[in-house]
Image (cartoon, coloured by chain):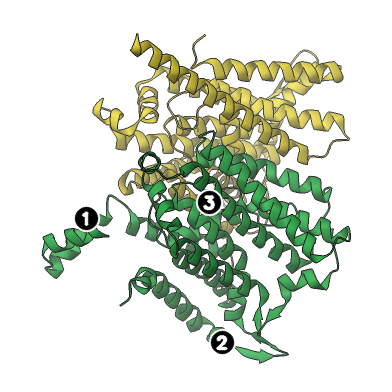
């Protein structure tokens, strides 16, 4: 089995299990129809609704790989959405609106990255500042109202369809592929991982960790900007209070479900976006299956707990050792393979 | 004045300065009424922030407190509505639950050796979900004992009301100060914040201390929930979203270093009051929008973090110079 597929296998299996479970309660879950030039069906809805979290998860994966965390992505979404809505409603047109939103996202990332990389502030605290202040900034832009607009070109990013697929879904898939290519076809991914494992050693080895860290937070801001654009285009209005509210936690959860360690190091963007889809499938599935949505959070909590146990640095080696003993694999060979990994 | 206590003095100085600015603009700010309301309105935040201070002093973080407070409110409201238990019995039951909940999170953090961030994130989902499962709607509390609690206050000179819940907060801060600075447990907390490895080598029972820390935070969140239910006379599972971040912000503004190992519980009280003062000022001004609160709090956070960073760097440089000599 190729390495790439083996890495995401647990997430694929989990997603499959969730889909099967939901289908058992709601048989039409996998049904997809073609209507008026676009695909419709619950599973398409999952892919579309999961777009913001999936986009955030792409950027968050890179940040977490450097042993950081970005709590500000939800607030960044609100800022970027507010900027885009402001530009559209002031009559600047589509391209400037997108440019303003993306610039705001990059600026937010630059701010976070500078605090982390230049001032040496812990990532949780550094991004907490923007998380707290960001919504205030977004409300300043919208002047405390829900800034609505009518612009078909911009609304396309929320409710349009490309080749029958919802535009938000196309955007997150494209973002995931582009970022994966960017970090895996170059040495960037390797360098990011090395910073996450040991920043000091990486710096001594000649990696410009300062610039790379800032770039990673800017990538996270860029993804958050797209998520903000989608959320704003979807409701045709910028809601500074609720756009992206608590999505940072879902994004972190997606990354953790994707099997990426919060302690930095090896990462997989594909696994993270699968994690985002798992979360969305659970959210949608609970609604479709007719369970009260109150169960949603408890199920999420249980899911995190299971994943924590599986990932635990103190339990996992013990369990792996026990499993090895059962299978009777020679210890030496596995140890060598582990060292090679 | 050592470098360690400098953030605390900076916090107090900024609070007094801010109060002076407020007073010069609105002389009515310096009445016992405003001070009494400042204590009452921020009582729930202050209590949970004391628990958060201990957690952060140990180098951890507790994201679950807001959800626990909301759970507490719903739990109390539904228990009072559906059973004939006396509120005090319900309070005891609730505090036992939230303390056990905190202890369980502490245990998981220790046993799984996972970052507190993600464990308490799961705890946040769980507590919020548990609140939802008890009731989706807001449940009013209608109990004669609650009227007694709500109307219990001491009339200060100048007609300011020192309410019961304000006193509970001040007592919690006092208790937190004693626990953090005067007990062996407190010393262990500081040791953990300085570094888990070194703490273990010094003979600190890391597992026990971690469990106690989060149990304490859970207890404080429960107590804060009790106070909040008295304050609002209702329980609502969607309440208090984001309180954990306000509590963390108060702790940081209060001069506690987020990496752990240095800080004062008293500073947290000043941090809470500073945040309350910003809100009071905005209410007094009337023309400013409430979102300025968020921006000012963000700016204060930045200021204090940079101040702490600068002090730490200065300290390290001084120590390096000393060891060279």
Q: If you read the primary sequence from the N terminus, does the residue marked by circle 1 or circle 3 appear first? A: 3
Q: Residue A232 falls in which quadrant of the image?
A: bottom right
Residue B325 shows in the view: yes
Secondary structure found at label 2: helix
Residue nearest the viewer, comparing A201 with A89: A201
Which residue is rendered at x = 54% and y = 42% of the image? B65
Q: If you read the primary sequence from the N terminus, does the residue marked by circle 2 or circle 3 appear first? A: 2
Instruction: Estimate how packed mark 3 is, as few (under 14), some (14 to 19) or many (20 or more) residues with alpha carbons within 10 Å.
Output: many
Instruction: Estimate how packed mark 2 is, as few (under 14), some (14 to 19) or many (20 or more) residues with alpha carbons within 10 Å.
Output: some
The residue carrying mark 2 is: A28
Q: Chain of mark 2?
A: A
Q: Is residue B51 left or right of residue B167?
A: left
Q: How many marks?
A: 3
Q: CA distance from mark 1 to mark 3?
A: 34 Å
Q: Which mark is residue A318?
A: 1
Q: Is residue B274 left or right of residue B92?
A: right
Q: Point out the image quarter for the N terminus of chain A.
A: bottom left
Percent coordinates x, y for residue B200 in the rendering: 27, 31
Q: Chain of mark 1?
A: A
Percent coordinates x, y for residue A334 in the rendering: 17, 62
Which residue is rendered at x = 67% and y = 75% of the image? A167
Residue B244 shows in the view: no
Q: CA distance from mark 2 to mark 3?
A: 41 Å
Colour for chain A in the figure: green
């Amino acid at each position: 089995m190729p390495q790439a597929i083996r890495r995401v296998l647990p997430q694929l299996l989990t997603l499959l299990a969730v889909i099967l479970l939901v289908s058992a309660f709601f048989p039409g879950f996998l049904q997809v129809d073609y209507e008026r030039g676009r695909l419709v069906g619950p599973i398409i809805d999952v892919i579309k609704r999961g777009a913001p979290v999936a986009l955030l998860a792409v950027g968050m994966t890179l940040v977490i790989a450097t042993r950081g965390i970005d709590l500000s992505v939800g607030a960044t979404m609100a800022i970027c959405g507010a900027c885009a809505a402001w530009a559209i409603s002031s009559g600047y047109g589509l391209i400037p609106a997108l440019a303003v939103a993306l610039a705001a996202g990059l600026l937010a990332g630059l701010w976070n990255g500078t605090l982390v990389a230049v001032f040496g502030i812990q990532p949780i605290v550094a991004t907490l500042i923007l998380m707290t202040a960001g919504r205030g900034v977004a409300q300043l832009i919208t002047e405390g109202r829900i800034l609505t607009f009518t612009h078909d070109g911009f609304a396309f990013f929320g409710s349009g369809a490309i080749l029958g697929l919802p535009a938000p879904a196309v955007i997150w898939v494209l973002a995931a592929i582009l970022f994966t290519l960017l970090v895996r076809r170059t040495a960037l991914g390797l360098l990011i991982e090395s910073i996450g494992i040991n920043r000091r050693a990486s710096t001594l080895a000649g990696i410009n960790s300062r610039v790379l860290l800032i770039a990673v937070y800017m990538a996270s801001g860029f993804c958050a900007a797209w998520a903000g654009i989608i959320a704003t285009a979807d409701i045709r209005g910028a809601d500074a209070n609720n756009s992206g509210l608590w999505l940072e936690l879902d994004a972190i959860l997606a990354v953790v479900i994707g099997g990426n360690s919060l302690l930095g190091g090896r990462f997989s963007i594909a696994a993270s976006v699968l994690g985002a889809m798992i979360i969305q499938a659970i959210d949608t599935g609970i609604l479709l299956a007719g369970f009260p949505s109150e169960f949603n959070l408890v199920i999420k909590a249980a899911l995190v707990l299971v994943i924590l146990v599986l990932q635990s640095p103190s339990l996992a080696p013990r369990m792996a050792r026990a499993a090895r003993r059962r299978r009777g694999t020679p210890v030496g060979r596995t140890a060598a393979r582990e060292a090679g990994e | 004045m050592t470098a360690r206590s400098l953030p605390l003095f900076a916090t107090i100085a900024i609070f007094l300065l801010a109060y002076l600015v407020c007073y010069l603009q609105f002389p009515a700010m310096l009445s016992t009424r405003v001070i009494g309301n400042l204590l009452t309105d921020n009582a729930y935040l202050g209590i949970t922030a004391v628990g958060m201070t201990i957690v952060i002093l140990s180098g951890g973080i507790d994201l679950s407190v807001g959800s626990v407070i909301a759970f507490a409110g719903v739990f109390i409201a539904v228990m009072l509505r559906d059973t004939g238990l006396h509120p005090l019995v319900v309070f005891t039951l609730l505090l036992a639950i939230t303390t056990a909940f905190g202890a369980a999170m502490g245990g998981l953090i220790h046993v799984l050796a996972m970052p507190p961030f993600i464990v308490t994130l799961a705890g946040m989902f769980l507590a919020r979900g548990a609140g939802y499962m008890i009731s989706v709607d807001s449940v009013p509390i209608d109990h004669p004992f609650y009227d007694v609690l709500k109307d219990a206050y001491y009339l200060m000179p100048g007609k300011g009301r020192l309410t019961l819940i304000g006193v509970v907060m001040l007592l919690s801060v006092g208790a937190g100060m004693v626990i953090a600075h005067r007990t062996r447990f407190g010393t262990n907390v500081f040791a953990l914040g300085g570094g888990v490895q070194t703490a273990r080598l010094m003979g600190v029972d890391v597992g026990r201390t971690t469990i106690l820390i989060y149990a304490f935070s859970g207890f404080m969140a429960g107590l804060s929930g009790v106070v909040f239910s008295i304050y609002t006379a209702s329980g609502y599972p969607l309440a208090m979203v984001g309180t954990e971040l306000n509590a963390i912000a108060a702790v940081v503004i209060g001069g506690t270093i987020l990496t752990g190992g240095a800080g004062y519980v008293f500073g947290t009280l000043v941090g809470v009051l500073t945040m309350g003062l910003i809100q009071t000022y905005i209410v007094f001004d009337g023309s400013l929008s409430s979102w300025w609160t968020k921006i000012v709090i963000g700016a204060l956070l930045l200021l204090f973090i940079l101040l702490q960073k600068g002090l730490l760097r200065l300290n390290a440089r001084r120590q390096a110079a000393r060891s060279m000599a």
